[in-house]
Image (cartoon, rainbow, N blue to C red):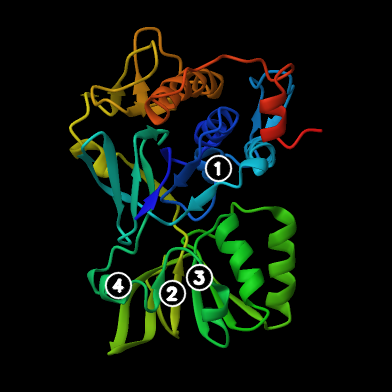
């Protein structure tokens, strides 16, 4: 079990800024996220889309904002636990215990839920027989590319994830890129590289078609594709990588006994605490009178929630507000000379 001052659920911009606000107060945090990288909606839904309402930043993309926030919290050496879904939360005296789907346990007096509109989960192949191969030969994310070496890989999808991994894995495996449309949505320069490899016979592209069956004998042997013109084709494959996009689910949060209002959590605007002492909700997932769903609002919410977190984590210390420009303690924590 890992002990810390604050458990942050969600690694989007608001969750990342929570690390900063806690860090300058001397509190340690861990960050848990269901995705395989930090950034939340900014990375998954609009990495290249301009954002115009971040103070002092006239324009930046979701990816740029995430990169800058990660750079900002480097001094705090925060541990991230990615590809982890929080399944269970329960109280133990004055502290909270958090358990994930991978049997990791965390212990802290405070939890900050910065889960946006819920957890992101990959859209999966709709064939029932695909379920038993998940984690063996059917995957919806790449955690370690070494396990895909020297394989026959069928990659499904038309966005950046599918194109990027097709390009990367083609360096050492046979790749078939499959999409239900003729047009791909990914970056044009990546697609150009893939088209070049297709001409060289290093990547095979199949469009417009969808998977209709998996053939197996204990292990995955092949898949059958059905084209829009009703023709079918069998493809020998060892591994399926599916990048069909993400769906947003509230998930287990709905079962934690919080004050839920539709798909949001009611909080006190004073400190963004929920109806459970020590559990805070910030960002798009929280609701209160006058709430605006802006990243800016989430930054304000974590600033106030972090003060209450300090009081709970350090009950014998008096909280003293300090400006970052004049506090030597804060500057030391930020690694400023």
Q: Which mark is residue 39?
A: 1
Depth check: give the residue in front, 325 or 46: 325
- Few, some or many C-alpha atoms within 10 Å of disc 3 (few <14, some 14-19, many ≥20)? many
Residue under numbered circle 2:
240
Q: CA distance from mark 3 to mark 2?
A: 6 Å
Q: CA distance from mark 2 to mark 4?
A: 9 Å
Q: Which one is earlier in the sequence, the residue at label 3 or at label 2?
A: 3
Q: Position of residue 185 (x, y in %)?
A: 59, 51
Name which quarter of the figure residue 328 lies in.
Answer: top right
Q: Position of residue 79 (x, y in %)?
A: 52, 50
* Secondary structure found at label 2: strand
Q: Which one is earlier in the sequence, the residue at label 4 or at label 1?
A: 1
Residue under numbered circle 3:
155
Name which quarter of the figure residue 211 lies in.
Answer: bottom left
Residue under numbered circle 4:
130
Decide if residue 312 is on the left or right side of residue 302. left
Decide if residue 128 is on the left or right side of residue 229. left
Q: CA distance from mark 4 to mark 1?
A: 29 Å
* Residue sitting farthest toward the right: 337
Q: Which one is earlier in the sequence, the residue at label 3 or at label 1?
A: 1
Q: Which one is earlier in the sequence, the residue at label 4 or at label 3?
A: 4
- Quick check: 335 above or below 84? above
């Amino acid at each position: 079990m890992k002990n810390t001052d604050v458990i942050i659920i969600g690694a989007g911009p608001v969750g990342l800024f929570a690390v900063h606000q806690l860090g300058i107060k001397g509190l340690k945090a861990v960050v848990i996220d269901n995705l395989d990288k930090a950034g939340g909606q900014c990375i998954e839904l609009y990495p290249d889309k301009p954002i115009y309402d971040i103070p002092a930043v006239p324009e930046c993309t979701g990816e740029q904002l995430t990169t800058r926030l990660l750079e900002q919290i480097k001094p705090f050496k925060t541990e991230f636990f990615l590809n982890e879904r929080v399944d269970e939360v329960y109280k133990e005296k004055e502290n909270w215990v958090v358990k994930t789907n991978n049997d990791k346990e965390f212990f802290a007096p405070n939890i900050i839920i910065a889960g946006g509109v819920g957890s992101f989960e990959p859209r999966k192949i709709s064939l029932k027989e695909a379920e038993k191969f998940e984690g063996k030969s059917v995957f919806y994310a790449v955690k370690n590319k070494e396990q895909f070496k020297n394989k026959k890989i069928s990659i499904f999808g038309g966005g950046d994830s599918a194109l990027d991994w097709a390009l990367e894995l083609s360096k050492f495996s046979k790749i078939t890129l499959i999409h239900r449309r003729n047009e791909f949505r990914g970056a044009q320069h990546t697609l150009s590289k893939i088209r070049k490899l297709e001409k060289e016979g290093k990547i095979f592209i199949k469009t417009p078609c969808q998977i209709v069956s998996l053939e197996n004998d204990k292990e995955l042997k092949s898949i059958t594709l059905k084209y829009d013109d009703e023709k079918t084709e069998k493809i020998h494959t060892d591994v399926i990588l599916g990048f069909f996009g993400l769906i947003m689910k509230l998930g287990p949060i709905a079962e934690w006994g919080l004050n839920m209002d539709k798909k949001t959590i009611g909080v006190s605007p004073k400190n963004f605490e929920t109806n459970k002492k020590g559990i805070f909700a910030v960002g798009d997932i929280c609701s209160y009178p006058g709430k605006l769903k802006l990243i800016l609002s989430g930054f304000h919410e974590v600033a106030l929630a972090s003060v209450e977190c300090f009081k709970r984590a350090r009950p014998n210390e008096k909280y003293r507000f300090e400006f970052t420009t004049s506090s030597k303690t804060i500057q030391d924590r930020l690694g400023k000379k």
